[in-house]
Image: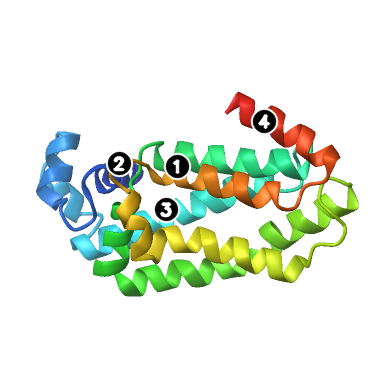
């Protein structure tokens, strides 16, 4: 039941925003009493925290299974994008994440710290593998490119500038464009061939 509540809460938070959804809404959607939810979560703030932790742990497990196990480092980027899209849903809006950051700043900061912990394992390792295998240019500054890419992905979750795009583009669409922008700047001709193939399939 606890995991069922977490999954439904995530779905509703993404659809309607973290601030808007109430415990009554979640109970109604699940067809259970609010008392049942309170048996697992004493307050909405606790439920939000548990939902965010659930998402992060699930995403981390998926990413760990993907990292280093794809056909190429370029394929790895697309696999990670797809698995996160499956977890969050394909139509999550930047405004939903912005609202989370605004009303739950301590939780947002905590997630940001956790993302930093995975930086070496995900972004830097991917860049090193891509260079060694000849898919990324050998002259790129790994530390600089890694930090730029990390900062850009983070900006979608915290920078008000991107909220202006929410009326026409989902977070999934923005991340797709960022990924293409990032990879086109670092691939070799060998890597570009693969990138073009993957973009056509997406």
Q: Is residue 118 visible?
A: no
**Of marks 1 and 2, which one's residue comes earlier in the chain?**
2
**Could you give the CA–CA distance between mark 1 and mark 3, rounded to whole angstroms?**
20 Å
Q: Are marks 1 and 3 in contact (CB under 8 Å)?
A: no
Q: Quadrant of residue 87?
A: top left
Which SS class for mark 4?
A: helix
Q: Nearer the viewer, residue 84 or 50?
A: 84
What secondary structure is found at the residue carrying circle 1? helix
Camera-side residue of 122 and 170 = 170
Q: Contact, CB < 8 Å: mark 1 with mark 4?
A: no
Q: Which of the two labelled residues, at mark 1 and mark 3, occupies the earlier sequence position?
A: 3
Instruction: Work out whether mark 4 precedes mark 3 in sequence or the reverse, and give the earlier one.
Output: 3
Q: Is residue 152 left or right of residue 69?
A: left
Residue 95 percent across, percent down from the top left: 29, 54
Q: Is residue 146 above or below residue 72?
A: below
**Quadrant of the frame with the C terminus:** top right
Which quarter of the figure is the N terminus placed in?
top left
**Position above or below: 142 against 1:** below
Residue 122 visible? The answer is: yes
Upstream in sequence: badge 1 or badge 4: 1
Dot 3, how many residues are within 10 Å of its Cα: few (below 14), some (14-19), or many (20+)? some
**Of the two numbered discs 4 and 2 in the rendering, the one whose residue sits closer to the viewer:** 4
Q: Residue at x 55, y 37 (%)?
A: 82
* Residue that label 4 marks: 198
- The residue at which mark 2 appears reads as 11
Foreground tag (4 vs 3): 4
Q: Nearer the viewer, mark 1 or mark 2?
A: 1
* Disc number placed over residue 172 in the picture, else none: 1
Picture quadrant where residue 169 is located: top left
């Amino acid at each position: 039941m606890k995991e069922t509540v977490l999954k439904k809460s995530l779905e509703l938070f993404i659809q309607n925003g973290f601030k808007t959804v109430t415990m009554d809404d979640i109970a109604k959607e699940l067809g259970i009493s609010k008392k049942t939810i309170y048996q697992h979560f004493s307050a909405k703030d606790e439920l939000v925290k548990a939902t965010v932790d659930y998402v992060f742990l699930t995403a981390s497990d998926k990413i760990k299974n993907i990292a280093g196990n794809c056909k190429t480092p370029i394929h790895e980027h697309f696999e990670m994008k797809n698995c996160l899209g499956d977890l969050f849903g394909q139509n999550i809006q930047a405004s939903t994440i912005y609202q989370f950051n605004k009303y739950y700043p301590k939780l947002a900061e905590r997630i940001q710290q956790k993302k930093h912990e995975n930086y070496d394992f995900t972004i830097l390792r991917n860049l090193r593998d891509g260079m060694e295998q000849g898919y990324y240019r050998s002259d790129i500054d790994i530390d600089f490119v890694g930090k730029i890419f990390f900062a850009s992905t983070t900006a979608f979750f915290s920078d008000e500038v991107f909220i202006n795009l929410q009326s026409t583009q989902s977070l999934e669409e923005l991340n797709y464009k960022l990924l293409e922008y990032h990879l086109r700047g670092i691939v070799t001709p060998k890597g570009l061939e693969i990138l073009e193939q993957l973009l056509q399939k997406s």
